[in-house]
Amino acid sequence: MTTIVLSAGGTGGHLFPAQALAGELVRRGKTIVVMTDRRGTNYAKAFPGAAIETVPSAAFADRSVLGLLAAPFEILAGIASAWTKLARIKPGAVIGFGGYPSLPVMIAAWLGRWPTAILEQNAVTGRANRAVMNKVRVMAAAFPIARFAPKDASKIVLTGNPLRPEVVALAGSAYAQPDASGPLHLLVFGGSQGARAMSELVPAAVALLPEPFRARLDIVQQCRPEDLDGVRKAYEAAGVKAELASFYTDMPARLARAQLVVARSGAGTVSELMAIGRPAILIPLPHALDDNQTPNAEILSKANAGWCVAQASLTPEKLAGMIKLAFSDPDDLAKRAANAHALARLDAVARLADIAENLAQSSYQRTAA
């Protein structure tokens, strides 16, 4: 049975696509091994039936001078460990999903001449993928690459981002545009690094809206636990109906119910907005590495599927005006919802699985020869 190695960083943005691909490859009869850093033992439930192998790795962000000096040696140790494990596993292909824990694995796979591919989830190639993109055979891309493409552009295959089954099940859900007097469904969320700004900006903007408009708002907002009380009090003072939580297990269903979304523009968020088809005001995370969220948001804004606004230029007054203007034109919201869905690539998992199988087949043919 062919074994495929998946290597991913420790965050959901890297692990969710790997999880989706693992499920598809298992359905196709493949054996899966997941290689990540020491946090990997926490992910066994996310990859049922897969073996988890941990490999030393190092990140360069938020480290002391001594930590930065030690990082190259940690990466070298990771490469040696990964090479040893790959030699034992003898994979048909090695697929990387970005994040620093994937770097030693992908370098070791290149050195050992195992067939390799990477998935870039953003429109800007991340630093770990950038380090190996000219060495791998295939670079799968969720979106057209806006910055930092490989030298050989022919290796880029536009696949889209793998989506959670819950999102695929709701893909293209009918958009219920606002009517003249009914509720206005607004969904607000941000990543763990971005939720604080949403908790400050959105309630302040909502408080500036006219009272008849506020009375129609039905807000669902994901907040950091430490922000919940303050946001709840702000909405109560504004007389606005709001449901708040630090985490929603049914976010795809809430996304499908929304008539307008205010969010960051991480790759997963943008891909799910496209799949379900919802208009959004996107506020890219200002401190993201290489400003990688802005090009994601611009894909939607340029397609007239949403709006992209920099946090540095966004005041509560400006955001209030954007929300009011958006809800005041239901036909335009419906068009933006349709435009968002037109950008979706719902077969990303199948495309990636095809790439992995083709690489594994080439490996088998080379071995047989």
Image: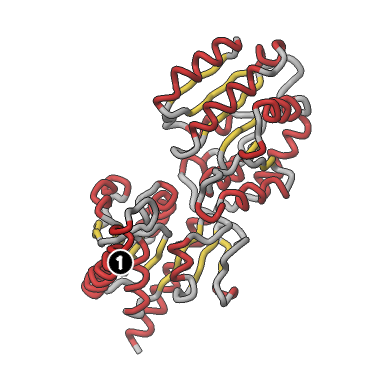
Residue 34 in view (yes/no): no
Q: Position of residue 15 (x, y in %)?
A: 39, 51
Asked if 161 appears above or below 151 in the picture, the reply is above
| Element type where label 1 sits in the image | helix
* Residue pictured at 57% horizontal, 66% vertical: 148
**Left or right of 49 in this view: 312:** right
List the single residue furthest toward the bottom: 369
**Left or right of 278 in this view: 235:** left
Q: Position of residue 287 (x, y in %)?
A: 52, 46
Residue 264 appears in which quarter of the rendering?
A: top right
* Residue pictured at 74% horizontal, 21% vertical: 179
Q: Position of residue 42 (x, y in %)?
A: 26, 46
Name the one closer to the observer, 47 or 57.
Answer: 57
Q: Amino acid at mark 1?
A: Ile
Name the one closer to the observer, 247 or 314.
Answer: 314
**Left or right of 43 in this view: 149:** right
Residue 75 appears in which quarter of the rendering?
A: bottom left
Q: Which residue is mark 1?
A: 75
* Residue pictured at 76% horizontal, 28% vertical: 325
How many tags in the picture? 1
Residue 14 in view (yes/no): yes
Asked if 163 appears above or below 323 in the picture, the reply is below
List the single residue furthest toward the front: 65
- For label 1, the crowd category at 10 Å Cα-Cα, with few meaning under 14, some 14 to 19 and many 20 or more, is many
Name the one closer to the observer, 50 or 191.
Answer: 191
Q: Position of residue 174 (x, y in %)?
A: 65, 34
Tell me, what colour scheme is on the image?
secondary structure
